Amino acid sequence: MSKSHCPGDNTSDFCSYVSDRGESTARAISVVAIFSSLLSCMGSVLIVYVYLRWPAVRSGSRAIITYLAIADFVTGFGYIMGSSNYLQYTSYGDVTAMPASTKVELCDNLFTPVCKIQSFLTTSSSMMSFLWTLILAIYLHTTVVKNRIRLAQQLVPLYHVIAWGLPTILIFVMLATDVLGYSPVASANWCFIGVNGDNTLRIAMIMVGGKFLEIITYVVALVLFVSTSIRLRIQKDGTLLLHQSQDQAKVAMIQQVDRKLLFIPIVFILLRIWGTLEFIFTEVYSKYFCTNSPAFLGVLLALRFLQAIGDGGQGWSNAILYIFNSPNIRNLLLKDLTTCCSRIANILNDCKNRMKDKTKDYEATTTSEYVRISVQDESHVDVGSSEH
């Protein structure tokens, strides 16, 4: 669709602040993104581990949390890849001052291949994360508010097709049509949508590439979770439902719903809203009020840093809500950690004891060999004396 773009390109359709934010500031944003994404990957791994380790926590809603964690892990990994790619590319010096041939070579051969892979991973996994967040809201609303537990469970296979299949197909098409790539808008130095020539087309592709679905998730998930929370409050401890129906499965479903799960969409909005605000702020302000005023640059910088923290941060935030804020799961993890540490300590002690035994054997062997050689030397001396 267009030639490759890399950090430092001055495109005519952006204000100068977009393509030249200052190398030190941009690199600091990338470091923050790597740190947040690394924590997200660790949190996602913990969520998956808990789900696989203890069958007692494998309820329908927690299974969806696990699928969400898988998507968040890929997103975090992709942002680590993208931010590291940016840091490596800019480590060669001021790319704006490079000779054109050197810059093209670095851009085409070093930055762009990793950029496209990272954009494919993070764009598709982000859409999967949006969809699983929506699905969690729909699932809880169907089971708690509508009391249609069987329907919610029957829809799970369809949810998998939608959440995993549709983003993969869509982003494959965008990759094949050369839409994915680097753009200084709507990202914190990682790659997303690489359409830089046509402003209208770029906005359209950004919306199709997940921004529209993200905004829809804000609204729909918030409405559904609020209604579910209200219903849970009314049905406290399942008492009202028990009077209305003798279906014990429904009562059990209500009692299994963890109220902390209802905070997931709120945390999702608090983390992801900054990228959306930065996108709107940049597009609208740069179009009508293109300026490098300190106030504007300050707001843009704050939004960039918050986006770097939030876009890859759903994994660690969900881990806090789902694991560290749950005493039962936290105690199970601590028990496993204690057992693991004990096993490691035992292994180290065994290795230490084996080393001591080997050292003693070596010393004993060395001593006996020394004695044998000494005896032989003495015998040779005696023989020589007798001959004389």
Image: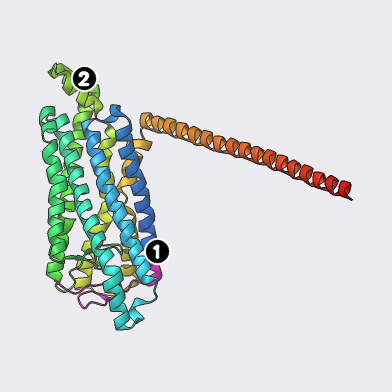
Residue 4 picture quarter: bottom left
Identified at 27% across, 43% down, the residue is: 69
The 10 Å Cα crowd at callout 2, few under 14, some 14 to 19, many 20 or more, is few
Earlier sequence position, callout 2 versus callout 1: 1
| Element at label 2 | helix
Q: Looking at the picture, tell me which residue is in the foreground, 261 or 38.
A: 38
Task: Give the number of the disc on residue 239.
Answer: 2
Q: CA distance from mark 2 to mark 1?
A: 53 Å
The residue located at (26%, 39%) in the rendering is 66
> Range of the magenta residues?
1-25
Q: Main secondary structure of the magenta part?
A: loop
> Where residue 167 sits in the image (x, y, percent)?
15, 52
Residue 318, x across and y down, in percent:
31, 42
Pointer 2 with pointer 1, Cβ within 8 A = no
Q: Residues within 10 Å of mark 1 (few under 14, many from 20)?
A: some
Relative depth, front residue between 256 and 359:
359
The residue tagged 1 is 28
Quick check: 173 above or below 48?
below
Q: Which label lies toward us, 2 or 1?
A: 1
Asked whether, in this view, residue 31 is left or right of residue 105, the answer is right
- Viewer-nearest residue: 6 or 276: 6
Label 1, secondary structure: give it. helix
Residue 17's place in the image compared with 238, above or below, is below
State the mark number for residue 243: none
Q: Amino acid at mark 1?
A: Ala
Looking at the rendered structure, the kind of residue marked 2 is Thr
Left or right of 258, for residue 173? left
Residue at position x 22%, y 38% in the image: 64
Q: Residue 18: tell me if it is visible.
A: no
Residue at 17% of width from left, 52% of height from top? Answer: 215
Residue 182: give x, y in percent of width and height. Answer: 24, 67
